[in-house]
Image (spheres, rainbow, N blue to C red):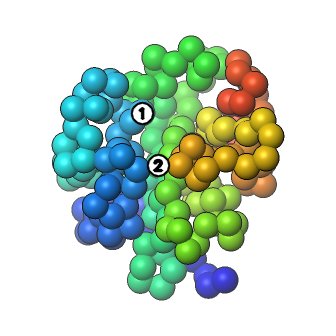
Amino acid sequence: MSAFTFRPLTVDRFADLEKLFGPRGACAGCWCMHWRLTRSDWTKGQGEGNRRALRRIVRAGGEPGVLAYSGVQAVGWCAVAPRSSLSGLKRSRILKPVDDQSVWSITCFFVAREFRRRGLTPKLMKAAAAHARSRGAKILEGYPVEPRVGSMPDLFAFTGLASAFLKAGFVEVARRSATRPIMRLAL
């Protein structure tokens, strides 16, 4: 497997993300806006609207995630941001805050098909942790799925798998659903 480099998403790298996500915006026109918008706003923006919303965040100086590169090609993405900027998490009963500590959250992954199942996701998590730490984060959370039996389609694992979070050094701190642990990494 080739070596990877990791870079935060910035204006000059937005075209790399667009190429990685393709015309469908990774999945169903999401453009990694699912956790940032109300369900109705996300649905209204599916596709181009959500792409523009993410671009606005980046143009305003936000770095809402990290890209993984193999050479000059972006091959992976991990969304990471302060939990306080993710309104979808505020509305979730299952993923409600564990305590009153300030945390950053990993909410989404996207890996190019030919790079899946090669151990890139834990590396993306470590790069996201370094990114969050460099911006003052002390705690990083993730909200993976844990399939009950066997495997699940990649589409349903966009928040990551619990096993990958464990490989990256996260520990489970809460579980309000059989398949949705809340995992943390002290930075």
From what the image shows, is residue 138 above or below residue 63?
above
- Cα gap from disc 2 to disc 1, whole angstroms: 10 Å
**What percent of the width, then of the height, locates residue 173?**
76, 28
* Mark 1: secondary structure: loop
The numbered disc on residue 19 is none
From what the image shows, is residue 48 above or below residue 176?
below
**What percent of the width, then of the height, locates residue 68?**
50, 68
**What percent of the width, then of the height, locates residue 125?**
62, 54
For residue 86, side relative to residue 151 (left or right):
left
Q: Badge 2, how many Cα within 10 Å: few under 14, some, many 20+? A: many
Query: CB under 8 Å between callouts 2 and 1?
Result: yes
* Mark 2: secondary structure: strand
Along the line of sight, which residue is nearer the eye, 39 or 37? 39
Task: Look at label 2 and name its amino acid.
Answer: Ala
For residue 79, side relative to residue 178 (left or right):
left
For residue 167, side relative to residue 140 (left or right):
right
Q: Earlier in the sequence, mark 2 or mark 1?
A: 1
Quadrant of the snapshot with the C terminus: top right
Q: Which residue is drawn at 48% across and 25% down?
A: 89
Q: Which residue is drawn at 34% across and 25% down?
A: 39
Q: Residue under circle 2? A: 79
Q: Residue under circle 1? A: 35
Along the line of sight, which residue is nearer the eye, 158 or 58? 158
Task: Look at label 1 and name its amino acid.
Answer: Trp
Q: Residue at x 66, y 83 (%)?
A: 1
